Amino acid sequence: MTEQLNPFKMAQAQLDKAAKKLNLDPQMHAFLREPMRELWVSIPVRMDDGTTKIFRGFRVQYNDARGPTKGGIRFHPEETVDTVRALSAWMTWKCATVNIPYGGSKGGIICNTKEMSQGEIERLARGYIDQIWRFIGPEKDIPAPDVYTNPQIMAWMMDEYSKIMGYNVPAVITGKPIPLGGSLGRGDATAMGVVYTIREAAKIVGIDLKGATVAIQGYGNAGYNLSRLLAKRGCKVIAVCDSKGGILNDEGLDYEAVKEHKNKTRSVIGFPGAKQITGEELLTLKCDFVIPAALENQITGRNADNIKAKVVAEAANGPVTLEADEILSKKGVFQVPDFLCNAGGVTVSYFEWVQNIYGYYWTEEEVYEKLDKKMTKAFYDVYEMAKRESVDNRTAAYMVAVDRVAEAVRLRGWV
C-alpha cells in the first residue's frame, strides 16, 4: 500500500474504511466525503514598518447536520487548505464521538507569528474576523484557539465580532480569557481529556499508571500540561521534545524545570541532566505510552514498525497515517485515536459556549467532572464498537461518529 500524506486524502480514506464496515449508503458516503462549504480570504495587514502585507486564510465548515460547526483557528507558515479540510472533517467526527451537538469546522492563516509583533498579530486576528464574520456566530460556526493561537487572540477576535454586531457576543468564540467569558478548566482541557483516555486504556492493557513511562512529542500547552497531569498520577515522563529537538532522562523529567528552561532558551534542548535526542527517536523509545502531541503525519509507514510503546495516545490531530495504523495494529499496539483522545478541548469549548449562552458559570471541579463523564463514555463507546465489530480503535471511532452524523443527515432529509 502506498502511503498518502495529504491530510485530507488520509481523512477521506479513513472515512472510506469505516463506511465500508457500516455498509453506508453510497450517496450518504459521497456526501460525507466532502466539506459542505469553504471560504478563502485575503487579509490585508498594516505591518509595523508601514507596509501592507496580504495574508491568505481559510475557513472550512465540513458538516452541520448535528448543530453549529465548531473548530479552531491555526496560524502556521505551512498551513494549507487540505490540512484545514482534514481538520474540519476530524472535528466533525470528534464532536460526534463525544456526542456533543456540533458539526465540524476549522480555520487557518498562512503566517509566521514568530516573526510578527503583538500589534501585527492583533491586526491579523481582527482582519480575519472582518473577512469571515458573516459566516460565523454562536448558532452558525464557533471558532477556538489551535496551533499558534491563544486566549488573547480569541479575545481580539471576539471583540472584533462584537464591534461588528454592535453588542457583546461572548459565545461566538471559545478558548477566551476567563474575564471575557472563558471557562475554568479550558486551559488544560485537551490534556485532561487525553489523561482520562490514557487512564482507561491502562486498565485494558494492564498498565499501572504509578511508575508507567511516558514519552511526549511536543512541549507546547498540551505537552506541558500532559507532563504535569501524568506526573501527578504517578507516571514517569522520560522524554519530551519541541520543534528543535528532544531530551531524554530515564529517571524522569521535572516538568516545571523543563518549562522554565524552555521559557528561558525557547527550546527544551540543553536541559541539564538530559540526553539530547530527535523527535523521531522519541517516538521509538521503549516506554509504556508514547503521546504524539505536535503535528500531523508523525508515525508513518517508515517508522511505525519501530514503535515500542504499548499504547499510542494521539493528542495531536492526524499524527498516525493509514499505513502506520495497519503496522501498529499487527504489532498489537493499543491506539487511542486522535478525535477520541484529544476531544477534551472541544468538549470544554462546548461547556464554555453553554455557559456563555446561559450566563451562568461552573466551578473548575464541575467542569472536570462533566469532562470525565463525557470522555469515559466516549472511550467505551469506541472500545465496545471495536470489540463487537473486530476492528481497530480508529475504525471503531469512525464507525461511532459517522453513524451519528449520517443519522442526523437522514433525519433532516438531505440524503
Image (tube, rainbow, N blue to C red):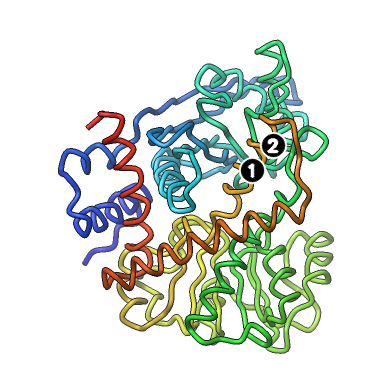
Residue 150 is drawn in which quadrant? top right
Instruction: Tell me the residue that label 2 is attached to.
Output: 355
Q: Is residue 241 above or below residue 276?
A: above
Q: Crowdedness of circle 2 by 10 Å Cα count: few (<14), some, many (20+)?
A: some
Q: Crowdedness of circle 1 by 10 Å Cα count: few (<14), some, many (20+)?
A: many
Q: Position of residue 35 (x, y in %)?
A: 34, 35
Q: Position of residue 353 (x, y in %)?
A: 64, 36
* Label pair 1/2, CB-CB below 8 angstroms: yes
Determine whether, in the image, residue 352 is placed left or right of residue 373.
right
Q: For the C terminus, which image quadrant?
A: top left
Q: Secondary structure at mark 2?
A: helix
Residue 234: assigned label: none
Q: Is residue 245 above or below residue 162?
A: below
Q: Amino acid at mark 2?
A: Gln
Q: Position of residue 55 (x, y in %)?
A: 56, 28
Q: Amino acid at mark 1?
A: Phe
Q: Residue at x 57, y 24 (%)?
A: 137
Q: CA distance from mark 1 to mark 2?
A: 6 Å
Determine whether, in the image, residue 152 is placed left or right of residue 352.
right
Q: Count the marks: how many? A: 2
Q: Position of residue 387 (x, y in %)?
A: 33, 73
Q: For the N terminus, which image quadrant?
A: bottom left
Q: Residue furthest top?
A: 166
Instruction: Tell me the residue that label 1 is attached to.
Output: 351
